[in-house]
Amino acid sequence: MSEIKNKVVMVTGGGANIGREIALRFAEKGAAVVVLDYNAENAERTVKEIEDMGGKAMAAPCDVRDREKIFAYVRQAEARFGTVDVLVNNAGGSAGLLGKLTRFVDAEVETLDFVLDTNIKGAMHCTQAVLPGMIAKKYGKIIHMSSIAAVVGLVDRVDYSAAKAALIGMAKALAQEVGQYNICVNCVSPGAIHRAGCAPMEHMTQLGETGHGGMPSDIADAVLFLSEQDYITGENLVVDGGRTLGVSHR
Ligand SMILES: NC(=O)c1ccc[n+]([C@@H]2O[C@H](COP(=O)([O-])OP(=O)(O)OC[C@H]3O[C@@H](n4cnc5c(N)ncnc54)[C@H](O)[C@@H]3O)[C@@H](O)[C@H]2O)c1
């Protein structure tokens, strides 16, 4: 089991909702946190929250599609805090971010590019930026934020379902390449998670789902758990309160 205290953690999309909760959780455990988010205001707000609780953090205002900037921020973070020990590839989302959810037959190629680039290549850029440091240190934990969309598929989100499934494949293949360097690569697949400012979602009370509806803290718990494990790699941890379990009748 690995200690998080004094580790360096980079959380993409760490400015709000699930990513913010993960960033704060690692800071509470004594890690220095690099908050990468294309919304600079969100990134700075999370950094301030961490500093206000006595922690160390740095904002990296950048899009996960911007490979050059990511590499530059990782070098800055390494110079300031040391090697990035834990990478949480959390930034992502569906065509809903563009207001363009639609049946696949009607999906525009620009939307497909946006969803695949953000979810898949974004995670690849960030992973390639931190991997040399992890390999040199012979230590690392990489956690991709997938989704139940990868496991069961979601209508109007064919591109997103495919992209999130790609992260699971990526984790399994990369885990085999980097196990020899003591690096673990895993995924967390959330169900419907409450977002700040939104009303509780209808599907949170679907058949089979446990009572309280998913909260960002449920996902932060899972990410922290995986970041502390040394013998779990190439796995996908579904955290959905049972939503994707078999159909049954009450
Ligand atoms: N919320 C859910 O119900 C849910 C369910 C399953 C999976 N997920 C996945 O969890 C992750 C986080 O979800 P969320 O709902 O907290 O996200 P969100 O849309 O609330 O965004 C969180 C933060 O990520 C930042 N961000 C978005 N795109 C970015 C980019 N390209 N580069 C850098 N920063 C970016 C935003 O500015 C924001 O501060 C995503 O990968 C999402 O696909 C979410």
Image (cartoon, grey):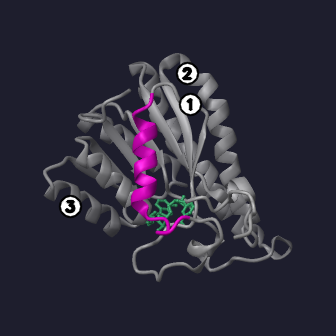
Residue 168 image point, x, y percent: 66, 43
Q: Residue furthest right?
A: 105
**Mark pair 1, 2: CA separation:** 8 Å
Q: In this picture, which residue range is highlighted in magenta?
A: 210-229
Q: Are marks 1 and 2 in contact (CB under 8 Å)?
A: yes
Q: Mark 3 vs mark 1: which is more N-terminal?
A: 3
Tell which tag, 1 or 2, sits nearer the viewer: 1
Relative image position of residue 201 (x, y in whole percent): 54, 78
The span from disc 3 to disc 1 (Cα, nearest Å) is 33 Å
Instruction: Specify the amino acid type for callout 2.
Output: Gly
Vertical placement of residue 120 versus 160, above or below: above
Looking at the rendered image, the disc whose residue lies closer to the viewer, 3 or 1, is 1
The residue identified by callout 1 is 233
Q: Which residue is mark 3?
A: 48
In the image, the residue with mark 1 has its CB under 8 Å from the nearest atom of ligand 1: no
Residue 14, can we see it?
no
User: Pointer 2: what residue?
Assistant: 179
* Label 3 vs 2, first from the N-terminus: 3
Report the amino acid beneath label 3: Lys
Q: Main secondary structure of the magenta part?
A: helix
Instruction: Give the residue type that dot 1 points to.
Output: Thr
Residue 123 at least partly seen? yes
Q: Quadrant of residue 153?
A: bottom right
